[in-house]
Amino acid sequence: MLRAIVVSPEPELAEALKQAVAETGQLGVVRQLDRYPDGHELVRVLRAHAPHVVFVSIAALKPAIELSQLGEQTAPGIQFVAINRTCEPAILLELMRAGIREFLPVPFKRQELIDLISRLREGVGKKPPVFSTTDLLFAFLPSKAGVGTSTLALNVSVALSRLPDTKVLLLDLDLNCGMQRFMLKLENAYSVVDACEHAANMDEDLWPQLVTSVKNLDVLHSGGMNPGVRIESFQIRNLMDFARRHYKAITVDLSGNMERYSLEVMHEAKRVFIVTTPEIPSLHLAREKLTFLQGLDLGDRVSVLLNRAHRRSVITPAQVEELLGVPVALSIPNDYHGVHRALTAGREVEASSDLGKQYAALARSLVEARPAAPVQQRKRLTEYFSILPARYSLAAQGKKNGG
Ligand SMILES: Nc1ncnc2c1ncn2[C@@H]1O[C@H](COP(=O)(O)OP(=O)(O)OP(=O)(O)O)[C@@H](O)[C@H]1O
Ligand SMILES: [Mg+2]
């Protein structure tokens, strides 16, 4: 069904139109504006609802034409329909010149509407409206509980939001142990669960109430512990669609439980970062998750973030790459005090610290879309992993060595 918004300073006219289109069952009015919006508001409304059609009253001609011009710039392909009680030929000509090719007279007649909708449908079929959307969607997946994923997701999001013209949304999708609310001391009563419930009819007035803005970063936390709560895949898709039209970059903090909605996010993501520490249990689980994602054809977008790495780590980044077969996008230093200070203050890690600089480097690489580092083949890690395939297992090695 086509989606439309109606702009009319006479609310009765908009109401009459809503009723008339509802009776056709072929077009839905998703938003009604009882005044000509300024440019900023128009862009917000268009991005929020992504309509195919805008009905605009030409009671005042100039703002109606300006609206259609800005609308066309914002989302080329949106169809505009002028509505009014009368329309003199000179005005009709002016509308045509401004690119408004349809005029619907008041009172609205059923057959005229049906014919109009069929022309609109044809127009949309030939040239659907194009809304600019971001593909910068990054998922952060813990290999194992407590490896530092939420800390990383938060700090990379803040670093991203400090880049020029980069409005960022951080979504906490860990519905049981979501830490973003705590880490930033957020008090917003709404959570990602509320956002999902309203995702299909999200609008530009509700959204700012759901998120908390920390400068150029908006955060949607996951609320309190609520094990029974469910998010459906279509809800998360709607939410992502909305967010993609509003933000330059979206980051998602996942629980690691591989819920259906998490998989949905990973399918939508440009890159999936498995966060692991250089320790055997978390590397083991990183590999399990990677294998699972490869089975879903998501392997090519996965890289690893090696958290709490230090120079004297027994397992090196190169060995992690060799073990997992995917690049280590970055090694992030262990800095207990830095993270502790940030937690206590309810904010991000200091940008000037080594840790802060690594987060910033990662953020820059995400928007620069630098290719992932090639995986280098190094000495095998057989001594650590009894979980390796049989040919690499200690037992197999022992046999090979005559043991
Ligand atoms: N680079 C780091 N250096 C030192 N400590 C860190 C670092 N990153 C995270 N931590 C600490 O590790 C602990 C776990 O962090 P965090 O909650 O971010 O992990 P998680 O993977 O999201 O865990 P969960 O499984 O609960 O979601 C926290 O105490 C955090 O302060
Ligand atoms: Mg977490």
Image: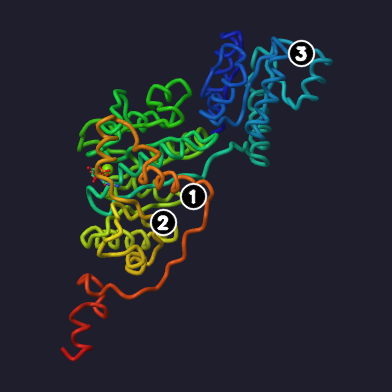
Q: Amino acid at mark 2?
A: Ala
Residue at label 3?
A: 87
Is the C-beta separation of discs 2 and 1 under 8 Å? yes
Q: Residue at x 44, y 48 (%)?
A: 362
Q: Amino acid at mark 3?
A: Cys
Quadrant for the N terminus in the image: top right
Give the CA distance from mark 1 to mark 3: 55 Å
* Residue 153 visible here: yes
Could you tell whether 59 is left or right of 341 in the image? right
Could you tell whether 180 is left or right of 112 in the image? left
Q: Amino acid at mark 1?
A: Ser
Of pointers 2 and 1, the one earlier in the residue sequence: 2
Quadrant where ligand 2 appears: top left
Q: Please tell me the numbered disc located at residue 184.
A: none
Residue at label 2?
A: 329
Of pointers 2 and 3, the one earlier in the residue sequence: 3
